[in-house]
Amino acid sequence: MYYLGLDIGGTTIKAGLINEANRVLESRKVPTVIDDLGSLISKLTELIRDFQKSGSIDAVGIGVPGLRSTKTHVIATSPNIPCLTNINLEASVADQVHLKVVSENDANAGAYAEFICGAGTGMQHLAYLTLGTGLGSGLILNGSLYAGASGYGGEFGHTVIDPNGRLCACGRQGCVETVASGTGIVTTTRERLKIAPHSLLNEIAPPLTAEKIYEAAVRGDETAREVFAETGRWFGLACANLINLLNLEMIVIGGGVMASGEVLLGSAIEIARQHAFASSFADCQIVQSRLWPDAGMIGAALLARDR
Amino acid sequence: MYYLGLDIGGTTIKAGLINEANRVLESRKVPTVIDDLGSLISKLTELIRDFQKSGSIDAVGIGVPGLRSTKTHVIATSPNIPCLTNINLEASVADQVHLKVVSENDANAGAYAEFICGAGTGMQHLAYLTLGTGLGSGLILNGSLYAGASGYGGEFGHTVIDPNGRLCACGRQGCVETVASGTGIVTTTRERLKIAPHSLLNEIAPPLTAEKIYEAAVRGDETAREVFAETGRWFGLACANLINLLNLEMIVIGGGVMASGEVLLGSAIEIARQHAFASSFADCQIVQSRLWPDAGMIGAALLARDR
């Protein structure tokens, strides 16, 4: 039995064929489509048919960067891929390929993958957080993917941690995502550069990115290191909130920022320790993802199998 | 079949006998014991034996103001009743009365009561919040009382919402409880009185309490009304975080402060609407408790029956 996972991101679509043993047998990446639903569905359909040439596919899972309703299967909001808003993507794709197709929020799919065959295997209560451009998150509670009333649960990146803080892309102020994300790292750096004219960061060719800031940190730039430590402190405070509210066994952290994040992770764990109840903190491991950057794709395939 | 619920508070112990139909047949209140475990157990034992005179009791549930481990049944922390810390209260009481005895965090017990026979009947995902001196909370997720790894879940009052905010009784800074609670109301009032020398509140005999501030609000005092509105804004922001993270169907609000809280509730709902995702907010009713002040006592009895 083979399952195809598709993960629709802001720049690429990742596709991977998974077998019963949760192994990725084959994978591909193609550019995404943001604003034309017809083209997007054609691209997805084409990908599925290409993979079908390699062998029979039993079901397809699609990870989407948006809120998917468990009641109607429609995507209620999708800020980064606007053409998906109010669309039942899984039905549209199933119409074309005549296969079982399921869809799920990408970070939820990632949480499911880490739970089934990643860092969180055997855990009953975990949060999967991806620090990328934004901050994605999904929850496994009592051994299953937590959906809430309509499947919109798990939006940890858009909980407010600093009511007088930065304006968020979502329109609110002081969301966790405004400080603990790639975008947050760039903003924090810009703020600090005003008071650190001698930092190596001033010599970086634009655009300023979290990756370039990390490279400066590795080269020993004090401002860059302090930016990662500060980001870690915010992230740790936010993790403490999750730990106090949900008494988790594990927080699994993925995303482009974490790939380069020892300073950040160390600072986050220390602050989470200070801000969570000792008894709850003692229950919770904070670890790096084992499946990132493929967690969303793998999780989508697993959900196609298990749902 | 009869079940006895005991709710150990900071000033009183409430006891109530519940029948199979979730009805309170008889209830009593006695002063609490804070610092002597032997006396507290004697008092609980005495209460149970008194109720046994009225008829046979099948099981006893005890609501405690602390974190109870689901693994060891020991109370890990109990700031308001220090003698309970590190005690297996249910085993100690069971030894005396030779009945099935269970214990549970008081707000968790309250959440269970609202879920079984209160405002949240029929809901699958709800938070029960009590605005009293502090802010207690319990979660029902996927139709059952949420415990987390060790039973410490649901500590919403000690999630940080204002990192530069007030020092909390728990030692952290800016917990939701520091602004959205009776203590928060008194502190907010003190801060505002410095800039409102003409408020009626200046004429109140000490000690200043949330209840007296509410009475001033009812008499039309502008400062007092603004304090309740501000408390509601903080509370609403915190509720939006819960809604975005957990996509709840309902937030049930009890506690002494809410008994007098239309201004607070109105302001909270408006701010929650502004700060939660529209699709998630639409799923969530924010309502007053139906069982407060007896929710903890009733929930303890129901847990004695159902666990």
Image (spheres, coloured by chain):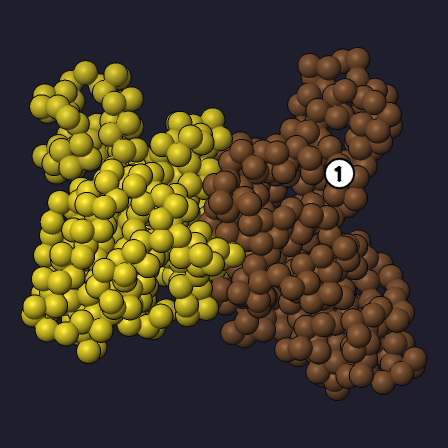
Chain colours: A brown, B yellow
Q: Which quarter of the image is occupied by the C terminus of chain A?
A: bottom right
Left or right relative to A292: residue B307 = left
Q: Secondary structure at mark 1?
A: loop
Please tell me which residue is depicted at 19% across the width and 78% down the height of the picture.
Answer: B1
Q: Nearer the viewer, residue A225 or B201?
A: A225
Locate residue B288 relative to residue A290 in the image: left or right: left
Label 1, residues with CA under 10 Å away: few <14, some 14-19, many ≥20:
some
Q: Position of residue B188 (x, y in %)?
A: 29, 28
In the displayed structure, would residue A72 be above or below residue A122? below
Kindly identify which residue carries mark 1. Answer: A261
**Most extreme residue toward the left, as rendered?**
B54
- Badge 1 sits on which subunit? A
Whether residue A100 is visible to the viewer of this picture, yes or no, is yes
Q: Amino acid at mark 1?
A: Gly
Q: Is residue A190 left or right of residue A72?
A: right
Could you say where residue A244 lies in the image, as x and y percent from the top left?
48, 46
At 46% from the left and 68% from the top, the residue drawn is: B142
State whether residue B40 is above or below residue B193.
below
Q: Nearer the viewer, residue A150 or B278?
A: A150
Labels in figure, total: 1
Is residue B290 visible in this depiction of the protein?
no
Snapshot quadrant of residue B182: top left
Residue B26 image offset from top left, x and y in percent: 9, 65
Residue at 57 percent across and 68 percent down: it is A144
Q: Quarter of the image for the N terminus of chain A: give it.
A: bottom right
